[in-house]
Amino acid sequence: MEFFIDSADVEAIKELGDFLPIDGVTTNPTIITKSGKDPLEVLGQISELLSDDQKLFAQVVATDYEGILAEGRRICSLRERNMFVKVPVSRTGLKAIATLKEEGLGVLATGIYSPEQAFWAAKAGADYLAPYLNRMCNYGDGVGQVVDLIETMAIYGFDAKVCAASFKNVEQVHALLVAGVPSITVAPEVIRSMVDHPGTGIAVDEFTANWQASYGRAAFEA
């Protein structure tokens, strides 16, 4: 199972990557604009934080076929390995996904709002499928549809991995982890909420206080 940070905040990526076994970073045009940096600059900084085995995803901005291909090739050239281009699942995008895969490039199909869109992206050869979970919930049972998608990929033996995206809370992440989602990308604030449960801090403080009261020190040995 792969767990990605969904961010272009270099400091947040560095913070979380320091203590979590993260598999890489996903970005999109909106996330990159929020960084306040030039796109190539921020992608270069993120890449420097990642090992060769960790993956980096960046999205095309062009909406025409030739433009998507040109941007996809440029994005995938930014690293020697484990660099993926994100392409929205429009009609033009699906056509471009097939071409980019024929060229041997790594592709994540994004902007997915239904299992049917993801099905066609998988048929086109996409490596990853990114359903927008929280946004899908605005149109119906988003969690249920992503679970259906996971099962559909397994039934037909597609190589494409579901990489669920667009989470607003820990409960949404929990629901898909339980469902066996192959990969997931989550914003830093939600990842922090997954880790920093207030009960853990209370328990640690109690342990330390009891040890201090009995042994006069806050460590196992003096």
Image (cartoon, helix red, strand yellow):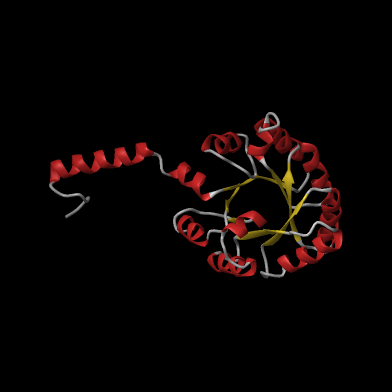
Taking the image as shown, residue 153 lies to the left or right of residue 204, namely right
Q: What residue appears at the point 48 percent right and 61 percent down from the top-left corner?
A: 11
Image height check: is 191 above or below 137? below
* Residue drawn at x 20%, y 49% as measured from the top left: 218
The C terminus - image quarter: bottom left
Rendered view: 145 above or below 162: above
Is residue 169 visible in the rendered image? The answer is yes
Residue 37 drawn at (x, y percent):
58, 66
Is 8 on the left-hand or right-hand side of 121? left
Q: Can residue 28 be seen in this snapshot?
A: no
Quarter of the image holding residue 29?
bottom right
Residue 128 lies, with reference to residue 40, above or below; the image says above
96 to 140, vertically: above or below: below
Residue shown at 71%/65% (left/top)? Answer: 75
Return the x and y of residue 112 as percentages of the image width and height. Answer: 74, 43
Residue 153 lies left or right of residue 174; in this view the side is right
Q: Quadrant of residue 77?
A: bottom right
Return the residue nearer the eye: 29 or 221: 29
Decide which of 211, 119 is in the foreground and name it. 119
Q: Nearer the viewer, residue 135 or 104?
A: 135
Counting the numbered discs, the total is 0
The percent position of residue 22, horizontal first and vertical second, equals: 54, 54
Q: Which residue is drawn at the image coordinates 76% and 48% (left, top)?
A: 159
Question: x, y (%) of residue 39?
Answer: 64, 66
